[in-house]
Image: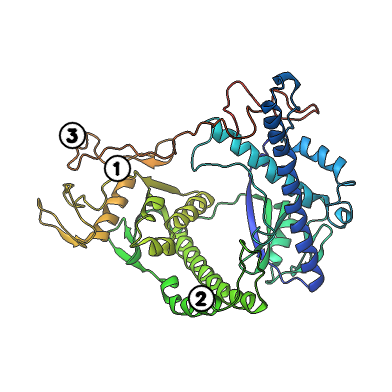
């Protein structure tokens, strides 16, 4: 499928708006999200059924050329097969006409992407965490979501309502006449809308093509180095020498008493049991909703605080320097894992990335092995060791005594002027020659970022990947069987 490219001078953005739907609209939203889940499960069963069938036929000694043909998981193939099956399949025959076609297309597109990701991972073409075989989505646990790309998608002239296909007009939680003004002026065009149940309420996300207008920052020539931490959320070292601290709000710690109390109430109720098929009681569901409200409030407070911090930084400085932290590795430390998750270091960097791009400013990401805390910000001497328990940096060469985080912030802001960005946006060490010698602790710069590639076992269904041209209709993507491993 051809990738969408915006017009010259335009950029693709997203606006996420909270909804206040009526009872009728809530029923339609639930119906569309359920239809997307049902279509996804149909696609998973449609494709994997052939895998098991071929495995059974192979056990009977049937030759390869006489096995059941593979079924393509490309979106056009799934769409064509679903349209032929939905009128006769008892799972859809009685109600499929109640929802928009976009609901079913959402589930089929997600299933196609899931199979693509699995095949690329097994073929060694996808890095990152292990991708398993697409599984069926549970009605109780699946996230309610549906995406609309065609039909009546608009913001009403009053700025208080939005219109979605087959769902109708839904009231917004906040007044947004600015969006309607941009659309009327020709500076914005809605591409798609995604409705989603998140944290106990419905949201709609508009993907738009908007005219790109750079907003000049307050200090375009200034730089700031950001050292993230747990005790203090962020230490900001300005290029003029001033250091400010952003305290850690610790929203999750402050809510622990409420969570413990709510969890005790939930534990005393009769909850669900998958082994025996026991259904949860009404009192358990009520207590569980009360506990979820505490978690939702913590998440909302954290999101609000991080957005205010990153927006203030990107609106003031022309250059922002952050560290490339191994957040996943830091989270494996059971002593600080909860506080690491509460501070959301990865979310801070993600917001800084797109907000600096929006303002046309520069984001420098220090190399993961850059010793910002162990380097003296005055003379440049590097300590061999500096435990986390030592919170004051003392230089053995020049005698500098400075707070550990402030020293790291000064080194990061100096990195903005003493290094250049690479193609990936990651800055290297200050002095490569100084670090060419042996490491005091024997550490190198090698970090395994992906799991070892897993090979297919004999006892699993599926055999090899479908043939080079599993589908027959125009538009199917090719699936190479000569270079990829067995799927199952």
Q: Report the residue marked by disc 1.
A: 418
Task: Tell me the quadrant of the picture where the N terminus can be found.
Answer: top right
| Residue 27 point in image, percent of width and height | 79, 67
Q: Are marks 1 and 2 in contact (CB under 8 Å)?
A: no
Task: Tell me the quadrant of the picture where the C terminus can be found.
Answer: top right
Q: Which of disc 3 and disc 1 is earlier in sequence?
A: 1
Marks 1 and 2: which is nearer the front?
Answer: 2
Q: Secondary structure at mark 3?
A: loop
Q: Whole-Å distance between the Cαs marked 1 and 2?
A: 52 Å
Q: Secondary structure at mark 2?
A: helix
Marks 2 and 3: which is nearer the front?
Answer: 2
Q: Which mark is residue 328?
A: none
Q: Report the residue marked by disc 2.
A: 263
Q: Could you tell me which residue is drawn at 38 percent across and 54 percent down?
A: 332
Q: Which of disc 2 and disc 1 is earlier in sequence?
A: 2
Q: Which of 340/462 is in front?
A: 462
Q: Could you tell me which residue is drawn at 81 percent across and 66 percent down?
A: 169
Q: Could you tell me which residue is drawn at 88 percent across and 54 percent down?
A: 97
Left or right? Give the position of 86 relative to 33. right
Residue 382 shows in this picture: yes
Residue 186 shows in this picture: no
Q: Which of 366/167 is in front?
A: 167
Q: Which mark is residue 437?
A: 3
**317 to 44, vertically: above or below:** below
Left or right? Give the position of 391 relative to 212. left
């Amino acid at each position: 499928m051809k990738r969408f490219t915006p017009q010259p001078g335009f950029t693709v953005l997203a606006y996420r708006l909270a909804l206040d739907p009526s009872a009728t609209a809530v029923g339609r939203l639930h119906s569309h999200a359920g239809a997307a889940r049902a279509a996804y499960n149909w696609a998973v069963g449609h494709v994997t059924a052939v895998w098991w069938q071929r495995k059974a036929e192979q056990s009977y000694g049937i030759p390869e050329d006489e096995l059941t043909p593979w079924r393509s998981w490309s979106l056009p193939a799934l769409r064509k097969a679903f349209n032929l099956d939905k009128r006769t399949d008892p799972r859809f025959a009685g109600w499929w006409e109640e929802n928009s076609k976009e609901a079913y297309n959402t589930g089929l597109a997600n299933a196609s992407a899931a199979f693509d990701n699995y095949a690329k991972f097994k073929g060694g073409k996808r890095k990152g965490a292990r991708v398993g075989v697409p599984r069926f989505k549970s009605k109780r646990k699946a996230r309610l979501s549906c995406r609309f790309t065609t039909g009546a998608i608009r913001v009403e002239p009053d700025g208080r309502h939005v219109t979605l296909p087959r769902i109708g007009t839904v009231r917004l939680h906040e007044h947004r006449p600015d969006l309607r003004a941009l659309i009327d002026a020709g500076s914005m065009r809605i591409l798609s809308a995604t409705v989603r149940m998140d944290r106990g309420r419905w949201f709609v996300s508009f993907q738009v093509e908007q005219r790109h207008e750079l907003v000049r920052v307050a200090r375009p020539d200034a730089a700031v180095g950001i050292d993230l931490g747990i005790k203090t959320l962020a230490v900001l070292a300005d290029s003029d020498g001033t250091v400010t601290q952003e305290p850690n709000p610790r929203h999750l710690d402050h809510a622990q008493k409420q969570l413990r109390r709510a969890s005790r109430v939930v534990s005393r109720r009769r909850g669900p049991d998958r082994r025996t098929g026991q259904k949860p009681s009404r009192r358990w569901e009520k207590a569980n909703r009360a506990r979820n409200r505490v978690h939702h409030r913590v998440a909302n407070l954290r999101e609000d605080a991080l957005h205010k911090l990153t927006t203030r930084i990107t609106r003031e400085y022309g250059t922002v320097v952050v560290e490339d932290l191994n957040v996943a590795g830091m989270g494996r430390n059971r002593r600080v894992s909860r506080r690491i998750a509460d501070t959301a270091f990865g979310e801070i960097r993600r917001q800084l990335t797109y907000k600096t791009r929006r303002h046309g400013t520069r984001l420098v990401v220090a190399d993961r092995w850059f010793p910002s805390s162990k380097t003296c910000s005055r003379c440049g001497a590097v300590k061999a060791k500096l435990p986390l328990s030592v919170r004051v940096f003392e230089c053995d060469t020049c005698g500098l005594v400075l707070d550990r985080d402030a020293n790291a912030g000064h080194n990061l802001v100096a990195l903005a002027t003493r290094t250049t960005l690479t193609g990936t946006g990651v800055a290297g060490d200050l002095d490569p020659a100084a670090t060419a010698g042996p490491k005091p602790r024997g550490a190198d710069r090698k970090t395994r970022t992906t799991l070892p590639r897993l090979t297919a076992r004999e006892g699993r269904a599926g055999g090899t990947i479908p043939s080079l041209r599993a589908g027959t209709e125009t538009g199917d993507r090719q699936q190479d069987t000569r270079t990829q491993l067995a799927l199952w």
